Image (cartoon, rainbow, N blue to C red):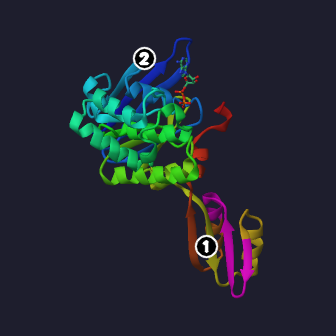
């Protein structure tokens, strides 16, 4: 069973925009899943379908093995939208107690959970203030507390750190790691690739309604480059290397050959083997999420 599963999910809006063109997605229990893609890729549409705010044109979306339209799924998930829109006349504490009530959290538990969450997101001192006086970052943190008020099994986050300063961003990441350690499944849409890279177990990259890549970072990451070290480099090999894109440095009794891609590395390895050159070591560098992302999307199609 999967926490989230979509099968051949399609959404065509009135006016003809094909926001999703047959999305198959699986999110496993307990993982932090990064959902990435340039603007217009269909990320918000996917979230809105999962939350049953809108209906698919065809295909299915399910949460916890039940159709997304099943109201019972709502009590098991928490959602933090990109722009947090809460009733301005409430205090931070009041918002949490109100939403706790809506989501069926027992009255006795509500106050205790609200206090715990306000502390956790760094809003304890502002808990009694009206949220009309909160900054964007404070609202975002309150939104996270609100999304956690029912102790959800699945947390859906849409651009959660866009309004946060670096300190709050780090705190936010720590909270995510705590949730992950406690077994909560997190589905996170973000443009901040370094952040996704540091917390996510798996990622999916979407473009114009189509899934481009999905998997763990190890699965998706190819070799970004490598440095080959050799001891004795015959003159013929030096000449042959100068015709490739590799960069040769001779230092002391050692030569290093820097290769900026897998293809260049393969050329160099072939060339050295043909000349019987003994390779001392090869140090490879794996692609970062940013390199995976740009390798996956077609930039011509980015609006
Ligand atoms: P993302 O969240 O990845 O930026 P969206 O899901 O918001 O992408 O949008 C996907 C595509 O669907 C875009 O081309 C967008 O303009 C279009 N779209 C989104 N919502 C609507 C809507 N309510 N009506 C018509 N087109 C929409």
Q: Determine which residue is flagged by label 2.
A: 57
Picture coordinates of residue 190 (x, y %)?
52, 41
Q: Earlier in the sequence, mark 1 or mark 2?
A: 2
Q: Which is nearer the eye, 147 or 42?
A: 147
Split into quadrants, the picture shows ligand 1 in the one at top right
Picture coordinates of residue 172 (x, y %)?
46, 49
Q: Is residue 230 something that shows in the picture?
A: yes
Q: How many marks?
A: 2
Q: Which is nearer the eye, 274 or 295?
A: 295
- The part of the image, by quadrant, that contains residue 109 is top left
Picture coordinates of residue 206 (x, y %)?
52, 36
**Left or right of residue 158, residue 229 in this image:** right
As drawn, 165 above or below 86: below
For mark 2, give the secondary structure.
Answer: loop
Which residue appears farthest toward the front when viewing the image?
128
Q: Determine which residue is flagged by label 1.
A: 273
Q: Is residue 22 something that shows in the picture?
A: no
As drawn, 252 above or below 111: below
**What residue range appears in magenta?**
248-267
For mark 1, give the secondary structure.
Answer: helix
**Left or right of residue 102, residue 133 in this image:** right
Residue 156, magenta (yes or no):
no
Instruction: State the mark number for residue 13.
Output: none
Q: Residue at x 33, y 54 (%)?
A: 181
């Amino acid at each position: 069973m999967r926490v989230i599963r979509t099968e051949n999910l399609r959404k065509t809006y009135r006016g003809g925009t094909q926001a999703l063109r047959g999305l198959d997605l699986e999110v496993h229990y307990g993982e932090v899943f990064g959902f990435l893609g340039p603007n217009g890729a269909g990320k918000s549409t996917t979230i809105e379908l999962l939350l049953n705010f809108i209906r698919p044109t065809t295909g299915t979306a399910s949460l916890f093995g039940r159709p997304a339209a099943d109201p019972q799924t709502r009590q098991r998930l928490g959602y933090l939208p990109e722009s947090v829109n809460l009733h301005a006349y409430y205090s931070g504490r009041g918002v949490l107690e109100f939403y706790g009530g809506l989501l069926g959290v027992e009255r006795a538990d509500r106050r205790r959970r609200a206090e715990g969450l306000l502390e956790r997101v760094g809003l304890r001192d502002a808990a009694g203030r009206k949220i009309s006086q909160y900054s964007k970052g404070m609202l975002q943190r309150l939104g996270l507390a609100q999304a956690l008020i029912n102790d959800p099994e699945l947390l859906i986050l849409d651009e959660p750190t866009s309004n946060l300063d670096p300190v709050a961003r780090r705190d936010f990441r720590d909270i995510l790691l705590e949730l992950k350690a406690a077994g909560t499944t997190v589905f996170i849409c973000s443009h901040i690739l370094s952040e996704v890279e540091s917390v996510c177990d798996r990622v999916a990259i979407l473009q114009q309604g189509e899934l481009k890549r999905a998997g763990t970072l190890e699965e998706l990451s190819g070799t970004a480059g490598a440095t080959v070290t050799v001891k004795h480099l015959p003159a013929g090999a030096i000449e042959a290397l100068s015709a490739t894109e590799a960069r040769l440095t001779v230092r002391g009794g050692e030569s290093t050959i820097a290769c900026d891609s897998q293809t260049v590395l393969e050329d160099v390895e072939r060339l050295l083997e043909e000349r019987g050159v003994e390779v001392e070591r090869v140090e490879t560098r794996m692609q970062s999420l940013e390199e995976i992302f740009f390798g996956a999307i077609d930039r011509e199609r980015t609006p």
